[in-house]
Image: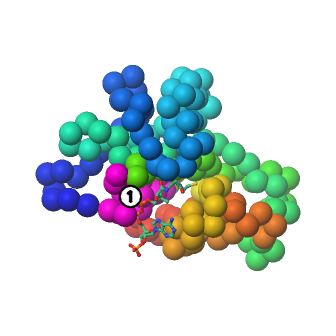
């Protein structure tokens, strides 16, 4: 990332943001952002956040929404520490993408940290942040950030909120 004066800002997606040229190289993530994201935000299906550079261009985006996990989906070691509720509340980081022009500069990690910080600050309880990695490479990106795979759904990962909280203490 650049000097302090060009630190990018994370903003809530609004009509002022030009989404048309965004290209992460993963077509479903780009199509979603260009055609669906505005509607999802208006209908409260997902909260959408964009990374805006000094010149106004959008370098990345992510979505956050509420979700729930069935207890048997989680690893046994995690289940042992949880009450026997049928559904466990969680936060879904549904999508995260950085424009190809800006990949490899730390923006992905910056956006992920921003998402985790929002999840921690929420007053709505949530046991973990969950991500659906698009492929093995995305999975490795999350594993480097201490996410753990679900035992029977290898591209779905989670990081317990008790662990995330420690990041920001
Ligand atoms: C995955 C993605 C979000 C990473 O963003 P980025 O800005 O390129 O990543 P960063 O520069 O912040 O890199 C953070 C760390 O992750 C690593 N990393 C980045 N992309 C990676 C990948 N695809 N696989 C494994 N590790 C990766 C980097 O090497 C870096 O680690 P280091 O600092 O130890 O070298 C971005 O490449 C992207 O949008 N890809 C296409 C869409 C996608 O796959 N999204 C994933 C969610 S489904």
Ligand 1 within 8 A of label 1's CB?
yes
Please say whether residue 116 is one of the residues in the magenta stretch.
Answer: yes
Residue 118, above or below 3: above
Residue sitting at x 34%, y 54%: 102
Helix or strand or loop: what does disc 1 sit on?
A: loop
Which of 164 and 95 lies nearest the eye of the viewer?
95
Image quadrant in which you'd find residue 73:
bottom right
Look at the image and give the residue range highlighted in magenta: 101-118
Residue 78 screen position, x and y as percent: 74, 71
Image quadrant in which you'd find residue 150:
bottom right
Image quadrant in which you'd find residue 74:
bottom right
Residue 21 screen position, x and y as percent: 39, 35
For the rendered model, the colour scheme is: rainbow
Please indicate whether residue 30 sits to the left or right of residue 90 in the image: left
Residue 93 screen position, x and y as percent: 57, 50
Helix, strand or loop: magenta stretch = helix
Residue highlighted by disc 1: 103
Quarter of the figure with the C terminus: bottom left
Please indicate whether residue 97 sits to the left or right of residue 7 in the image: right
Please indicate whether residue 110 sits to the left or right of residue 95 in the image: left
Residue 86 screen position, x and y as percent: 85, 53
Q: Does the image show residue 160?
A: no
Which of 99 and 69 lies nearest the eye of the viewer?
99
Residue sitting at x 47%, y 69%: 166
Please say whether residue 158 is one of the residues in the magenta stretch.
Answer: no
């Amino acid at each position: 990332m650049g000097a302090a004066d060009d630190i990018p800002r994370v903003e809530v997606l609004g009509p002022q943001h030009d989404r048309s040229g965004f290209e992460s190289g993963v077509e479903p993530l780009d199509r979603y952002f260009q055609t669906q994201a505005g509607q999802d935000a208006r209908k409260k299906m997902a909260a959408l956040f964009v990374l805006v550079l000094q010149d106004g261009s959008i370098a990345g985006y992510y979505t956050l929404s509420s979700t729930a996990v069935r207890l048997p989906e989680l690893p046994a070691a995690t289940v042992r520490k949880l009450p026997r509720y049928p559904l466990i509340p969680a936060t879904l980081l549904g999508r995260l993408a950085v424009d190809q022009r800006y990949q490899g500069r730390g923006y992905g990690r910056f956006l992920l940290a921003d998402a985790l910080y929002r999840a921690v600050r929420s007053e709505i309880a949530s046991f973990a942040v969950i991500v659906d990695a698009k492929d093995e490479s995305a999975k490795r990106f999350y594993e480097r950030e201490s996410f753990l795979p679900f035992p029977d759904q290898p591209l779905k990962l989670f990081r317990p909120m008790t662990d995330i909280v420690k990041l920001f203490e």
